[in-house]
Amino acid sequence: MKANTQKAVQAEQSYNRAVNGVSVSNDMIVIQEFKNRGIKATPRVDVFTYNIWKFQKGRQVIKGEKSVKVRTFIEDEKTRKTRCSTACLFHISQTEPVEEVK
């Protein structure tokens, strides 16, 4: 599987978990951290990971933007074991639409 294809699949899975409310434990952290930066954020509406913005939303994170990092759990598809990981989240105001190549 090509690297971009694999990232796109992972982004889709992550997006599905996010919008279906599976990952709600970090909402208050996300809201507060973006509020500290002067950004009104709504998790799972206008705050996503880099790969979700790129592969699901057609947007690119602007160079130099800083993420809000939260702890999350990821299930290994082969072993079915859950491991702790860090998710780096960006607000839509930190992104821009990807221009299509013609």
Image: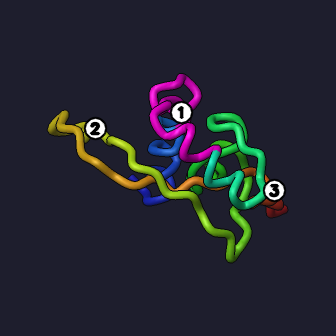
Q: Quadrant of residue 46?
A: top right
Q: Earlier in the sequence, mark 3 or mark 1?
A: 1
Q: Which residue is mark 3?
A: 97
Left/right placement of residue 78 relative to residue 85 reads: left
**Tag 1: Cα neighbours inside 10 Å, few (<14), some, or many (≥20)?**
some
Say what secondary structure mark 2 lies in: strand
Q: Amino acid at mark 1?
A: Ala
Q: Are marks 3 and 1 in contact (CB under 8 Å)?
A: no
Q: Which residue is mark 2?
A: 75
Numbered circle sitting on residue 87:
none
Question: Magenta region: which residues?
Answer: 15-31
Residue mark closest to the camera, 3 vs 1: 1
Residue farthest to the bottom, as pictured: 64
What is the spatial separation of the Cα atoms under label 3 and label 1, in whole angstroms? 21 Å
Q: Are marks 2 and 1 in contact (CB under 8 Å)?
A: no
Q: Amino acid at mark 3?
A: Pro
Q: Position of residue 61 (x, y in %)?
A: 69, 63
Image quarter of the C terminus: bottom right
Q: Position of residue 97 (x, y in %)?
A: 81, 56
What is the spatial separation of the Cα atoms under label 3 and label 2, in whole angstroms? 31 Å
User: How many badges with numbers are in the image?
Assistant: 3
Q: Which residue is mark 1?
A: 18
What is the spatial separation of the Cα atoms under label 2 and label 1, in whole angstroms? 14 Å
Say what secondary structure mark 3 lies in: strand
Q: Position of residue 24 (x, y in %)?
A: 49, 31
